[in-house]
Structures are given as C-alpha cells and as structure tokens.
Image (cartoon, grey):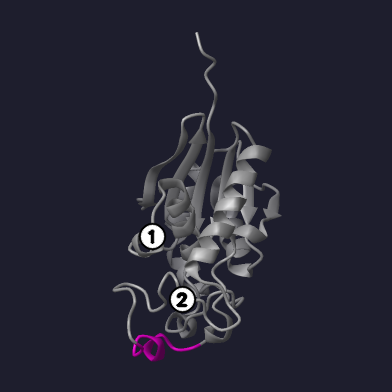
Amino acid sequence: MSEVITPTRFCLIRHAVVLPEYLALLYGQMDVPICPFRLSQDGGRYAALGKILPKDAKWLISPLGRTKATAEAIMAAGYGDTPLEIEPGLIEQNFGLWQGLPMSELIRRPRQHPFWPVGGDEAPPMGESFNQMRDRVGITMDRLVNANPGKTIVAVSHGGAIRAAAAHALGLSSYQALTLSVDNLSITRIERSGHGWRVTSLNEQISI
C-alpha cells in the first residue's frame, strides 16, 4: 500500500477594503490603509473567518500594512493571537510609475484585457508585468510547500497575487488569470499533494 501524503494547504485571503479615496487609483504596492468604517461594518465577516480558518495554521502577510491590519482584525474577532510572518513573495504587483494613477486615466489607453487596465504582458515603467508577478508568486508557493510539507498556511495577501497563485496552480495564462474575481475578505483555497497542485475553492464568500 502506498504512503498517503498529507497535502500542503493554502488559505489565501484578500485584504480588507482600503480607504475610499484610494479605490479609484491603481494603488498596487502603495502602502494604503484599510477603511475604519468598513472594518466596523464587516465585523461579522471577520468573526466568521475567525471561526472557519484552521487553528493549527502558519500565518503569513505581505510587507504592506493592509494585510497585517486584516490579519489582526481576524484574530481579534475570535481566531486568537498567532505569530505573523512577512512573506515578500506574496506582495501585490509592482506597477512602477503607474502606481497612484487614476483608473479612469488608465482605461482610456488601448485595452489588452476586458477586465483589467494593465495587460498580463505589460510591464509598467520601473514595475513588473503580471507574468513576472506570476513567476515570483509561483516560486514563492513552491518554496513554501518545500518548507512546510503537510502543513496549512493562511496568507493574507492581495487580489493580483492570489490570481497569480491560482494561475500557477492551474497553469493559466495571464489573460485567463486576469478574468478571475478575487473579492476583499474572500478565501481562495489551494493545495499541493504528491499528485500536483489543485484549487479547491476560489473567491469563497464568508456568510454571516
């Protein structure tokens, strides 16, 4: 009988909604804060996340403050205190000189994708393309599996990085990956076993 190998599981959570004045901008790796009003309004969702997330998990955040604030809110809502480790490989896409530009300005350019103003092959000046981010996130996911075999990892990250993780697991093109919806405070579950990668849920909405 062959040995059963426990898969390494990832629960990827997109950070909370940021302050309204940033929502119309391509904020990327800008360190923008989450919205205090939405933090209060979404209290039930944080509590629900605190109940369903695995209790024996390793917690990761990106270097940006909005992921730390989101993780701390989930823990305060009932999960309990757990050490947070910063994982730079799961940071949002670097839009370089385009960071901070209004979305309305970007969508006036010739579009390469129907749902996103920056095409997967486009590398903004002094930034990275989605393809480059997908490679970076994929290398990070592989490294985390090798370092944490059979463990569960909860990572509070970003919409672009979570799309990149799903693209890595499913072998999607950047065009396909940019069609995926990843909402704030949603969970995307990805695992790696001896059979390979698979996505067990995408953009999972937490009911309260």
Residue toward you, 26 or 84 = 26
* Picture quadrant where residue 113 is located: bottom left
Looking at the picture, tell me which residue is in the foreground, 3 or 59: 3
Q: Provide residue 76's location: percent of width, then percent of height.
A: 59, 54
Earlier sequence position, callout 2 versus callout 1: 2
Say the numbered circle drawn on residue 67: none
In percent of the image, x 45 and y 46: which residue is there? 169
**Looking at the picture, does residue 62 appear above or below residue 127?**
above
Q: Magenta stretch containing residue 102, yes or no?
A: yes
Q: Position of residue 134 (x, y in %)?
A: 51, 59
Q: Is residue 12 magenta?
A: no
Give the amino acid type for the residue marked by disc 1 in the picture.
Ala
Which residue ends up furthest to the front in the rendered image? Answer: 121
Q: From the image, state whether disc 2 or disc 1 is nearer to you.
A: 2
| Relative depth, front residue between 116 and 173 | 173
Q: Is residue 164 visible?
A: yes
Instruction: Give the residues drawn in magenta, as a range.
Output: 101-109
Q: Residues within 10 Å of mark 2 (few under 14, many from 20)?
A: some
Q: Name the residue at 49% across, 53% down.
A: 165
Label disc, if present, on residue 177 of the rendered structure: 1
- Work out which residue is located at the far top of the displayed protein and give it: 1
Element class at badge 2: loop
Considering depth in this image, is 103 or 186 the residue closer to the camera? 103
Q: Which label belongs to residue 122?
A: 2
Q: Classify 16 as above or below 29.
A: above
- Left or right, residue 91 beside residue 107: right
